[in-house]
Amino acid sequence: MKKAAFISLFAILGCVADPNNIEATVEPYRLSASDLNIAKSAVAEESREPEAVRFRNFVGYKTSAGDTIVCAEVNAKNAYGGYVGYRPMWV
């Protein structure tokens, strides 16, 4: 009985798509002002000096679940007060 239950549970779980894989569009999505503000706020909140964070090269993508992914480059200050250079980020 336990073996049959285990096999049927395994068969059911095998049908579920991998929850860690989300499909995104290949073509860029036109970002709204709201999308940009949310992404900028989320990244700036995590920095030492939120008002000094710089952004460039924004690109947006839509996922198969309907969410928006915002990709950009961000430059923020380090502990010594100097900018570290532009680095990729996504929200």
Image (tube, rainbow, N blue to C red):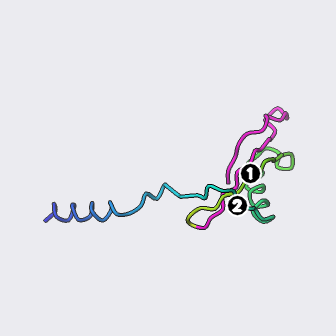
Give the quadrant of the N terminus: bottom left
Name which residue type carries label 2: Tyr
Task: Name the residue at 63% across, 62% down.
Answer: 62
| Element on which disc 2 rests | loop
Q: Between marks 2 and 1, how big is the CA–CA gap?
A: 20 Å
Residue found farthest to the front: 27
Left or right: residue 1 versus residue 64 is: left
For discs 2 and 1, the disc positioned in front in the rendered view: 2
Q: Which residues are magenta?
A: 66-91
Give the quadrant of the C terminus: bottom right
Task: Name the residue at 74% across, 57% down.
Answer: 39
Compared to residue 26, the image places residue 87 above or below, namely above
Compared to residue 31, the image places residue 44 above or below, namely above
Whole-percent x and y of residue 77? 81, 38
| Element on which disc 1 rests | helix
> Which residue matches tag 1?
43
Left or right: residue 13 versus residue 58 is: left
Task: Name the residue at 69% across, 56% down.
Answer: 28
> Which residue matches tag 2?
29
Crowding at mark 2 (Cα within 10 Å: few <14, some 14-19, many 20+): some
